[in-house]
Amino acid sequence: MELICPIDQRCSHQIAALLRPPSPPIVQEYFDQLISKRKCQGIKVKQNGDFGKGVFAETDFEEEQLIFKDEMLVGVQHPSNKVILIIFIIFLFFWSLNMFNGLHFIVFPNFQIDCLVCSYCFKFIGSIEKQIGRKLYLKTLGIGNSSHNGCQRNSSDDEEDDHYVQNHHSSEDGASSSSGSTIPLPMMAVESLMNGELALPYSNKFPLPSVVSCLGGCEEAFYCSKSCAETDWESSHYLLCTGEKSESRSRKALLKFIQHANETNDIFLLAAKAISFTILRYRKLKASHMSEQEKPASSILGTDLSLLLEAWKPISIGHKRRWWDCIALPDDIDASDEATFRREIQELAFTSLQLLKEAIFDKECELLFSLEIYGHIIGMFELNNLDLVVASPVEDYFLYIDDLPYPEKKEAEKITQPYLDALGEDYSNCCQGTAFFPLQSCMNHSCCPNAKAFKREEDRDGQATIIALRPICNGEEVTISYIDEDLPFEERQALLADYGFRCRCPRCLDEEP
Ligand SMILES: C[S@@+](CC[C@H](N)C(=O)[O-])C[C@H]1O[C@@H](n2cnc3c(N)ncnc32)[C@H](O)[C@@H]1O
């Protein structure tokens, strides 16, 4: 049965206008402004390279030098890395009623655990005690799915995306729990961490910003500052908040949409942010346009598409294809089943879109709710996203204790070791998610790259950080590797085929049989 999206049928011309790449002068102006805003004047986005857009050095860079940092346009923490707070609150409620009084020890199953981070900039927030206490609480609930330690990619992620892992320091040596499995802790000990009664030794060496609540009152978003809370609210959360002050059309529908995304693919949460971001930009543009013209809304109906095109510009600039056309065929799907697989992906996107439409539909921006647009937004994320990784201060804390001189270390460990044992290997879990970075997404691939996406010790938020792998001269293109470039030629080409292209970097041209 054919999927029919009425908006696609009715508005095919306007949808084609939204999907048409902006003209080169518009693209240039957009990136020049972005580079100036980011204060990364050492680079320029050029459009006339061999592979379309690319990032070029405008100065010389030394090996290991920071080339630029890029702020995400939209990003999400993976649901498996974040507590589902509704369950958490129910748990706390029963606990406050002393309904768990009979339970004197918490049993810690081997589940992946959460990181409490700012929902806008992804910095860790609260305190070392809150981070640890919360992790231990949640372990008792068994929230999350499969456990994987440290900051490695989820096994369900594509192997070919490994280049996008922004590694940070390894936790191979240093602090460790006394056994591979976790050791239960008395409930009181965990509770006193959570409510701030217990201060762990030396935790003041790792201060974290206090937790700021969501402006809409939801229990899913938390921030490191009022400014992050306000910026997130204005850029997309206003429509996607599930709290009392939510401006969504239906909170129930929104919860359904979120649940569906959590159960299927969190790329839908990112797509929802992109749509909400565009709707809110459109409303702002329209309001300022109206006040400039001093005319009522009805009189500028004819210019709506141009306002929507302007609001959509940051998304329109990203390289994109339809999700179900560009997604890599998983290894376990036979080539003869490819058409069915792609069809199922399209149906999944359609289901998600219907749920989102019920939750935040806006008649004036209805083009954004067409399946064609939804498919292209998700496809853009599929082709351009970078893994979001922020190292955990909890790991740093335990490493610090481990590095203390002997008498201090022994004293401190009397208190900290039971917590480390209860956390087990999960003590080093970092914040993980996925995000779209406008400048970084212009970087082309090379199998002999001169740069890498890499977080340094001081990079403790969700920004993308690009570092020179070797000296780079003024005028040279800055490239990263999307895959493991140490693989042989054919394997590299096979992995890059999943990105929809055959590599024509100097090394591949040289190695081509
Ligand atoms: C993330 S985008 C990079 C920016 C892109 N050039 C643009 O114009 O938006 C990746 C796309 O750039 C092109 N590309 C990047 N590196 C390439 C390479 N080494 N060989 C051939 N095409 C490449 C491919 O079309 C690929 O799908």
Image (cartoon, rainbow, N blue to C red):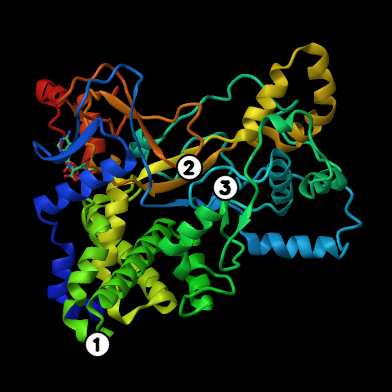
Between 233 and 331, the one lying in front of the other is 233
Residue at image x 43%, y 60%?
269
In the depicted structure, whether residue 14 falls above or below residue 318: below
Which of discs 1 and 2 lies nearer the camera? The answer is 1
Q: Quadrant of ligand 1?
A: top left
In the depicted structure, whether residue 153 falls above or below residue 79: above
Amino acid tagged 3: Val
Residue at image x 50%, y 61%?
263
Query: At numbered mark 1, what does the secondary structure look like: helix, strand or loop?
Result: helix
Which circle's residue, 1 or 2, is located before the other in the chain? 2
Between 205 and 192, the one lying in front of the other is 205
Q: Tell me how far mark 1 sits from mark 2, CA to CA.
A: 50 Å
Q: Alpha-carbon neighbours of circle 2 within 10 Å: few (<14), some, or many (≥20)?
A: some
Which circle's residue, 1 or 3, is located before the other in the chain? 3
Residue hosting label 1: 298
Which of discs 2 and 3 lies nearer the camera? The answer is 3
